[in-house]
Amino acid sequence: MERNTRAARWGRLAAVLLLLCSMVGPLPAAPAFAGPTVTALPAVDSGCPPATADGQVVYGCNELSRHLQRARLWLQQNKPPGTDDKLFKNAGSSNYAIARLADGKYIIGYSDNLKHSEERLLDQMNGKSQRITFDPATGRVSYQAPRASGIAEGFSELEPCDNKCGPKLRSAGVRDKFTWSWQWNGRDGDTKDDVKAIRDQSNNSKTGHKTLALRQLKANNGPGRIDNPANAQSGIGKAVQRQAGPGRPGGIDFSSVQLRYVSDGTSGNTYSFKAPTTPGKPSTDGTGAIYDAYTALNVWMTVQPSKFWVNLNPDEPNRIIDADLAQTDVGRVLLESDLTLKESGTKLIDPNSVVGKRFWDRMRAAGLSKFCKRDWIVPKQATVRESGSELYILEAPLEVKSEGADFQMPGSEFTCPGDSKAATDIYRAVVVPELTRLVNESPEYTDLRRVYISRVAAEWYRNRLAKAGTAEDFGIDSNDVDTLESVVPWDPKALYNKYLKQLNSVIYTTPDGFVVTAGGVDFTQPVKVDKVTDTNFEQQYPALPAVVQKSLAEVTRTTDAKDAFNGGADLVPAVITPPASPSPGGTANGGDPDGGGGGGGGLPVTGAPLYGIVGAGVVLIVVGLLALWRTRRVRWVASR
């Protein structure tokens, strides 16, 4: 009987333990997000890896990022019709951030052309702007009155940038309180091109980890863990890898690449770049050039066309470049090209040069010795071939315009001559054609030609998105250059001061005269295109389609071997809506207090691995069965 009692006790204990385990689940594991420089955060998903030392977490793997996911969804689903509020308008694409304040409230920051998302959090922290509050209980976002309160912890989707956000967060003493999901900055030893590759991987408009995560979030319609897609590849990245790899063909100047073919796919795009061949010479690296061409494409689509200008004029020091364009490398290229144009013009009218001698001879013959003018660069009509969702950019020339000008020289009593029409006519006839040739052929303008051809492609994408009614979804004209800023900051004022210094420098002595030049680059007008017909395209470019298609897999030379094409197609993983999994309580989200399943499917959210839970259950069942068998055996023996 003693044996019987002991076995029965073991059996009953095992049954009770098994019942409790099935009802309650194992105890949660310790928080997995404590790093040496970040605030410890609670784990919300058993599949989440720990935070890195500098604060990187998987999107949806901490409480703040899930709150931000819910806020994004609410803003997208509750956008007022026709609103201009960028808090709502940018919710589908721009970078957002969230912070928990010391008073327990949650605030949201968003990026646009004026401020980064983290800067908006700091303004709210300091009581300088309205609070944009998130209510975890309802999932709603609302504006509230300003009130200062310190940031206890924060989260930003993209790593706070080294140029602006990071320093401001550090200055406020809160940088080490932020976690983030996608890398944005380089690390020790990284080059500018390395940083461009990092940004393409994180934020490519089709294949970027953040881009795909936001698509998945929308498909989920609820917060949860979203890992980086391992098989996502951008066509741009493929082109870079192919020309930079050890097996690349020789004799190609990849540093001079231009975007000459694009396609608009339902999920991803296709790109192909043309580069001149250099027989007998080693190939040059085009990594930066390819990324720059792609970034320019996005700048031209994001910034309003009315801002596509730069201006170097001695009496307009405050109208050098638009503030949004000034944050990008496109703006830098335009302004540097404008300065180069002034330098080219100065060299051409040197009386010791062939063109300069001819110019001054005609000036003297007309009784002229002084001349103030304005030179600027504009697009000429581009020649393209459009075929359904494909665009071939065949020709995209630029030209130089010139007119007489009247302006003041800073710090001097200099004045321009009143009548400059005759001098302008001579200059246009003798010098401008040579300037136009240089702009279209000289290596000094390679970057300008590259970014302009991306402007042609951008105009095509703009028109297609406008017709489809999806322009706003892709941030067209949003002016949000937060993720398009220059890798290395630059100063427009420094280029302006260099221009003034050149104006006051004596480069050569003219025959009793002078020429002063102002000007700019003006890409504000819509690109005019001449569309080649099917017949003419087949006659003039019979092999081009085959060359372009082959270039998506390998670098391919044209039939005349003068150029080579190198491209790639975006590989975009399909976004799959996860099926709803009813929980024991009858809800589809498994009881997640944030409203999202997090891939849990009704299982309790714990830190214990699944195999451990299953193993423990099996052991308890075996113990219970053995105890039961032992009890029955003892009873049978006793009855005999």
Image: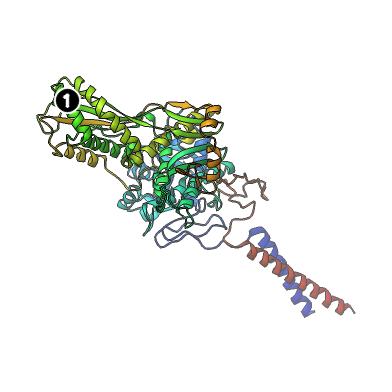
Q: Three-letter amino acid code at disc 1?
A: Met
Q: Quadrant of the C terminus?
A: bottom right
Task: Please tell me whether residue 596 is drawn above or below residue 372 in the rendered image.
Answer: below
Q: Which residue lies under the disc numbered 1?
A: 363
Locate residue 131, reporting x and y percent. Answer: 39, 40
Number of numbered discs visible in the structure rendering:
1
Considering depth in this image, is 132 or 634 the residue closer to the camera?
A: 132
Q: Is residue 420 left or right of residue 4?
A: left
Task: Please tell me whether residue 404 is drawn above or below residue 637 in the rendered image.
Answer: above
Task: Please tell me whether residue 186 is drawn above or below residue 123 in the rendered image.
Answer: below
Q: Quadrant of residue 407?
A: top left
Per the image, label 1 sits on a secondary structure element best described as helix
Locate residue 205, reporting x and y percent. Answer: 48, 42
Locate residue 44, reporting x and y percent. Answer: 54, 54
Considering depth in this image, is 487 or 120 the residue closer to the camera?
A: 487
Q: Quadrant of the N terminus?
A: bottom right
Residue at (45% x, 47% y) in the render? 200
Extreme residue toward the right, this view: 640
Mark 1, other Cα within 10 Å: few <14 / some 14–19 / many ≥20: many
